[in-house]
Amino acid sequence: MARTPLIAGNWKLNLDHLEATHTVQKLAWLLRDAKHDFADVEVAILPSFTSLRSVQTLVDADRLEVKYGAQDISAHVSGAYTGEVAGSQLAKLGCDFVAVGHSERRQYHAETDEVVASKTKAAFDNGIIPIVCVGEGLDIRKAGDQVSYTLAQVDGALAGLPADRAKDVVIAYEPVWAIGTGEVATPADAQEVCGAIRGRLAELYDAELADGVRVLYGGSVKSSSIAQLMAEPDVDGALVGGASLDPEEFAKIARFRAHQVGL
């Protein structure tokens, strides 16, 4: 099954709504100028909550092909949950995607697999595609337990998720030791875990479903490394951090096919 690659930029706690607008405008211009084929590669950005309305207005007004989403979602529908943002609110802003279970949420906000599963469900309940983030820390990697550890996170995030929803999930493998450190997993490292994730999906559901799910790699992705990563059979895109704040660099990452053919 042909899987459309997804290159998603996680802006984290960066850029105000004015900077976000300028960045999206420049990114869209760069991709259009480069004759980027959006039918072949999906490009998405995940700005801060405060920038979502500005991004929505720009994308709608200029009919940009860039998709967008949020960095987090509440597991709650509504109520007395100060600081939370509900899935229904994100849906009203036209979000296509939402990151769920990012390692920084797990580390700094003590999000458990059960919480990640609840947020995954909340995303689907509101017609938003969750990008479920999984991955190991350096201690796990050194112990050689990266596959079993990551698959346990996959199991937890998808617990109780029916096949008709699981077929649309996006899973991002982000080795924590490679996020923001300048370290990048080798293509073989990425393939080992991404391939194992696809294998687990086949076990949880079936081979056809597993073959259709997009599995991304994230962890200090740059234009200099993306082509080699994307050449692996089970790597279907990237969740890009710091490099996505630079429109020129992010556009180069989105145009990974040009690097693969030596252009």
Image (spheres, rainbow, N blue to C red):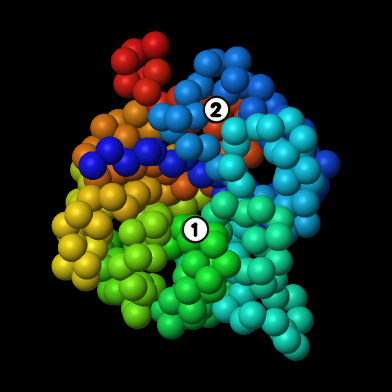
The local crowd at label 1, few if under 14, some if 14 to 19, many if 20 or more residues have their Cα within 10 Å, is many
Quadrant, the C terminus? top left
Q: Position of residue 32 (x, y in %)?
A: 59, 20
Q: What residue type is labelled 2?
A: Ala
Q: Where is residue 86 in the image (x, y as percent from the top left)?
A: 67, 72
Q: Position of residue 241 (x, y in %)?
A: 54, 46
Q: In this view, does 33 lie to the left or right of 120?
A: right
Check the image and report above or below for 32 versus 147: above
Picture residue at 57% right of the left edge, 23% below the top: 31
- The residue wearing badge 1 is 129
Q: What residue type is labelled 1?
A: Ile
Tag 2 secondary structure: helix
N-terminal of the pair, mark 1 or mark 2, is 1
- The residue wearing badge 2 is 251
Q: Where is residue 174 in the image (x, y as percent from the top left)?
A: 40, 55
Picture residue at 23% right of the left edge, 42% below the top: 1
Between 68 and 72, which is closer to the camera in this rendering? 68
User: How far, Cα to Cα, is label 1 from label 2?
Assistant: 22 Å
- Dividing the picture into quadrants, the one containing residue 257 is top left
